[in-house]
Image: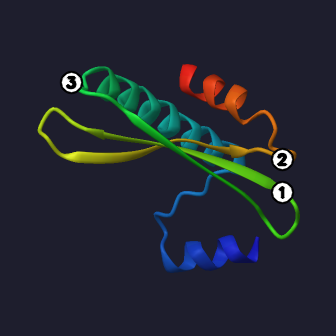
């Protein structure tokens, strides 16, 4: 409450929102950007090259990043992260996970 009072003192027009509102807004932005990416990938005149990166954090948590590389309709090389997700070891089902992510 004291933090809110301090911010309000400094700026009377400040708006506060909850963690749930912020998470909802971020998810809406994510969905909009995902839709735009799908639309742009459909229009690509050539092929898409995918690369993956897998690693573990010091806490043993595993992660996978799937990246698409392509030349857009203007001839510009583009790189976009398609997915960044938790992927705990063992990493024996990499191919199945990649197929799942690419289909999505």
Q: Residue at x 79, y 53 (%)?
A: 62
| Residue 7, horizontal then vertical, whole percent | 58, 75
* First reached walking from the N terminus: tag 2 or tag 3: 3
Disc 2 vs disc 3: Cβ atoms closer than 8 Å? no
List x then y, in percent, for residue 29: 48, 39
- Determine whether the residue tagged by mark 1 lies in a helix, strand or loop: loop
Name the mark on residue 88. 2
Tell me which residue sits at (11%, 38%) in the image: 74
**Residue 98 location (% of width, % of height):** 63, 31
Q: Considering only vertical position in the picture, is 11 above or below 79?
A: below
Q: Disc 3 vs disc 1: which is toward the camera?
A: 3
- Discs 2, 1 touching: Cβ within 8 Å: yes
**Which quadrant of the view contains residue 42?**
top left
Say whether disc 2 or disc 1 marks the residue closer to the N-terminus. 1
- Which residue lies under the disc numbered 1? 61
| Nearest to the observer: residue 16 or residue 53 | 53
Residue at 40% across / 37% down in the picture?
A: 49
Question: SS at mark 3?
Answer: loop
Q: CA distance from mark 2 to mark 3?
A: 35 Å
Residue 34 locus on image (x, y percent): 46, 32
Residue 45 is labelled as 3
């Amino acid at each position: 409450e004291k933090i809110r009072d301090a911010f309000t003192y400094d700026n009377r027009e400040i708006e506060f929102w909850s963690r749930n509102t912020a998470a909802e807004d971020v998810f809406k932005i994510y969905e909009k950007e995902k839709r735009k990416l799908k639309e742009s990938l459909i229009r690509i005149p050539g092929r898409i090259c995918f690369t993956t990166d897998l690693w573990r954090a010091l806490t043993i948590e595993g992660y996978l990043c799937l990246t698409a590389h392509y030349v857009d309709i203007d001839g510009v090389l583009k790189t976009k992260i398609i997915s960044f997700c938790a992927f705990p070891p063992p990493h024996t089902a990499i191919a199945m996970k990649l197929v799942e992510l690419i289909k999505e």
